[in-house]
Image (tube, rainbow, N blue to C red):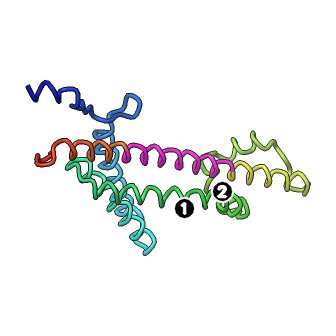
Amino acid sequence: MERIRYAWLSIQLDSPKLGCIPIRPFLIFGSSLGTFITLSYLVTEPLTIRNVILCALGASFNVCLVYGALKYNDKALKYGQMFVIFLMIISTALLCFMPVSVTASDDQIKKLTGIFDERTLLEINGNVPEQDSKKAAGRKFLAGFVAGEMVVLFLIVYILSSYMEYVMIKRLRKFIAARKGRYENVMLA
């Protein structure tokens, strides 16, 4: 009798999704991949203090997300969510300053436009002889502009993907809270 009375109170909990992407497997796969990429960067690049610190932060963030998603650990996901917010704030600040600093340096422009060979750059800029200083200045401006826009595009894509990750973590945390409210004494994974 009581089961029938409270049957309308039961909540059907489906696994959370972002569009058609199941969140938990996506976070586990993405964070596992991020951990391997971070560790491979540490192995392949020269060891500097900056590289070690950045790799340690990246690896700990990804391990935290993998553990939180595998074990339905809300605390680990909360730390991951705070780290994503921190990264979005830093990336937004970089969006204000990075394009100017990149375009001001010829070395940075050459690094960023290094995906193009000399022939392609000449086609983009046109065949300009170096004697004409106005045309050379225009060519440098165009190369700096392209490099700055590449940085802006990269940062915008990174901020948007970080926001997507933030939403995924938030939905998984809500799912965990709903399951804990429904199954307080049951082990979740």
Q: Which mark is residue 114?
A: none
In the picture of the structure, the residue carrying the numbered disc 1 is: 90
- Residue at (36% x, 42% y) in the render: 171
Q: Amino acid at mark 2?
A: Lys
Q: From which residue to which does the magenta span run?
A: 149-170
Residue that lies at the very extreme toward the bottom in this rendered image: 49
Instruction: Tell me the number on the disc at residue 110.
Output: 2
Q: Is residue 160 magenta?
A: yes
Tell which circle, 1 or 2, labels the residue nearer the N-terminal end. Answer: 1
Q: Which quadrant holds residue 105? A: bottom right
For this rendering, which residue is in front, 12 or 140? 12
List x then y, in percent, for residue 187.
11, 48
Closer-to-camera residue (18/158): 18
Residue at position x 85%, y 51% in the image = 138
State the CA–CA distance, disc 1 to disc 2.
Answer: 25 Å
Label 2 residue SS: helix
Secondary structure of the residue carrying tag 1 is helix
Q: Give the quarter of the figure containing the C terminus.
A: top left
The residue nearer to you, when weighing 86 against 116, is 86
Q: Residues within 10 Å of mark 2 (few under 14, many from 20)?
A: some
Kindly indicate the quadrant of the structure image that contains residue 1.
Answer: top left
Q: Position of residue 49 (x, y in %)?
A: 43, 75
Indicate whether residue 167 is drawn in magenta: yes
